[in-house]
Image (tube, coloured by chain):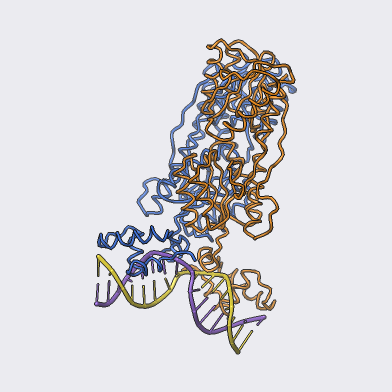
Chain colours: A blue, B orange, C purple, D yellow
DNA sequence: TTGAAAGCGCTAACAC
DNA sequence: GTGTTAGCGCTTTCAA
């Protein structure tokens, strides 16, 4: 019922090897033969079976993508970068959500390897030791996109999160702020607990400003908790004049809470977020934000993976992309 | 080098058929044998090759997902619904972006069929005749999620877009509005040109209100064009008192333009959007919005597909999901 | 309850 | 340039 390479071969009076050559663009085919085969392919509407091809060639032209949650704009943007480059190199993507759950990550890694993907791009906010090990054991290359891991031998693509956060705090300090708060996402994520928080502390200390634990609030990263964050500062009798927000969503929550408390942004309180999603310019005040090049991180990760797949030399397996600060209206 | 079913069979002193039975949970295996095989599988870290299995069984447990753009929150939400249910039924997802481009859609359909997916869930804002035909020709079931097509024989999952839009306009009318504008996305998308616009006109006519073409503005759906939309009304000397926005992003643009022109929302102009993304409650004023159950549309589409794959009887191939209007602060 | 053997549809030597 | 043939790793009859 379905047309196979054998049917085409018979109809075209050639061997299946020749059909295979035509289909795969092998040059060792006489033009006349090629033409004849192509005609039969068209007439029979032959569509090569990628599964059979995969089994025979040990290449599936599929790559696995494991991310925490596709419905989160941040990961979606990154995924789009991955997919565009994958398409460019003729790979397809098998996408799965891990919900940032170690067990799921491990299962997904296993499932994808079972599906014989040629490689994997993974994104995880907290790479556990077990996951790191699974990555090391993988028979196919795995690139970590926008994820932090100690092991240099595992390919990664990131920006310098520490420096980026440092720049933001420094910007506040330069403006004369002394009451600078940090409203963070989960602190057990390395990017938050180590880089953003670390940079926050270092910048403050370097400016001889006291690091007040009360000014550091770890939320779950949602809008609703960010709102509570500002209120809790006030309850403690604290009134920050500048806030470094771990994400755009956090920034929004904080800003609305500030406004609800009768203060203005940026006049009374200045806010800088860490993300710069599309949202940042579609809200009022528009968010001053550290611009995470999410699409690029995804794209470069996939590009790096293609190099690994082609066994090309890669000078640096740990790519650091540039970032910038987008100045808008949540700062003066 | 890689462990195959044959290695396991040899080590366990059974035939590969028996190993296959154990792996596939076939009950016709003596418990003792099963145990022995399981041990060897564990010891050898045997991982079944899904490609070989796919070739032999003609089932890949992969389903294709074709959407316009994963970086757009609307499609991402839908995709998450698809993926969750797919995972529940042990399917993996091959995801591709079509950018709402007919040629790409056709190519993707073809690629996925070549990869022998067991089924496809597709989302398209404008299903062309060629694409409809390709869907009909498909050897595997295809479900259209949140997409409009004339042909009842193609399975779909939607809400009643016409009625939903009608409700929104009716709400404005009931409040006594007479100058009601419709800022739309591309009108060549059936959902816009036929349903939202159609409902807009019908509701107005039914209330004996004049349908003024000047009050109908077709944008490309972006925030920036939505901003221009309000300005263009004003330039024409028109000042709508109520605006029906085709999406949350359009609503945001319109609202900001209104505010920039010195008017207030909802006091001077009321706005209702059509989408209710997470955004809707994270902006000020919070958006009154027709709540599209995007996640559910995705989930139900995938569920419908599993039924089709299992050759279950499906009473209704064209599923209509309920919707609601979320009243917030962009209306009085 | 288990095994033998014939494919699934294709690629990739190797030979001619 | 083209054909022959041996797998790729698994499922699935069919026998035993």
Is the C terminus of chain B in the top left, top right, bottom left or bottom right quadrant?
top right
Q: Is A173 drawn above or below residue B103 in the view shown?
A: above
The residue depicted at 45 percent of the width and 38 percent of the height is A296
Look at the image and tell me whether residue A330 can be seen.
no
Look at the image and tell me whether residue A75 can be seen.
yes
Horizontal side of residue B80 vs A62, given as left or right: right
Percent position of residue B187, x then y: 54, 30
The residue depicted at 38 percent of the width and 65 percent of the height is A8
Q: How many marks?
A: 0
Q: Is A73 drawn above or below residue A208 in the view shown?
A: below
Q: Is A42 drawn above or below residue B66 in the view shown?
A: below
Quarter holding residue B260: top right
Percent position of residue B139, x then y: 53, 58
- The residue lying toward the viewer, choosing from B2 and B162, is B162
- The residue lying toward the viewer, choosing from B139 and B289, is B139
Quarter holding residue B310: bottom right
The residue depicted at 66 percent of the width and 72 percent of the height is B26
Quarter holding residue B191: top right
Q: Is B53 drawn above or below residue B303 in the view shown?
A: below
- The residue lying toward the viewer, choosing from C2 and B227, is B227
Percent position of residue A130, x then y: 58, 54
Percent position of residue B104, x then y: 45, 44
């Amino acid at each position: 019922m379905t047309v196979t390479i054998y049917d085409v071969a018979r109809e075209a009076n050639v061997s299946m090897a020749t059909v295979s050559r035509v289909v795969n663009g092998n040059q060792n085919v006489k033009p006349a033969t090629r033409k004849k085969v192509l005609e039969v392919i068209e007439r029979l509407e032959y569509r090569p079976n990628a599964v059979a091809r995969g089994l025979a060639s040990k290449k599936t032209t599929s790559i696995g993508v494991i991310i925490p949650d596709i419905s989160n704009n941040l990961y979606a943007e990154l995924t789009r970068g991955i997919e565009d480059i994958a398409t460019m190199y003729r790979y397809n993507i098998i996408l799965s959500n891990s919900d940032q759950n170690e067990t799921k990550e491990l299962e997904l890694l296993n499932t994808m390897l079972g599906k014989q993907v040629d490689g994997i791009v993974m994104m995880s906010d907290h790479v556990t030791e077990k996951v790191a090990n699974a990555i090391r054991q993988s028979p196919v290359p795995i690139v970590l996109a926008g994820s932090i891991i100690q092991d240099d031998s595992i390919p990664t693509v990131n920006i310098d999160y520490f420096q980026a956060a440092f720049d933001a705090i420094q910007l506040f300090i330069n403006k004369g702020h002394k009451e600078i708060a940090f409203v963070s996402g989960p602190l057990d994520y390395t990017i938050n607990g180590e880089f953003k928080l670390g940079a926050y502390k270092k910048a403050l200390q370097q400016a001889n400003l006291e690091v007040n634990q009360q000014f550091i609030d770890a939320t779950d990263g949602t809008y609703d908790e960010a709102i509570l964050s500002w209120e809790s500062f006030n309850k403690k009798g604290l009134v920050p004049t500048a806030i470094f927000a771990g994400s755009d969503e956090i920034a929004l929550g904080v800003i609305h809470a500030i406004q609800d408390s009768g203060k203005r942004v940026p006049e009374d309180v200045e806010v800088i977020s860490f993300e710069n999603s599309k949202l940042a310019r579609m809200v009022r005040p528009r968010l001053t934000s550290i611009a995470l090049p999410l699409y690029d991180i995804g794209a470069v990760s996939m590009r790096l993976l293609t190099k690994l797949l082609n066994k090309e030399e890669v000078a640096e397996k740990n790519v650091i992309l540039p970032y910038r600060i987008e100045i808008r209206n949540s700062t003066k």
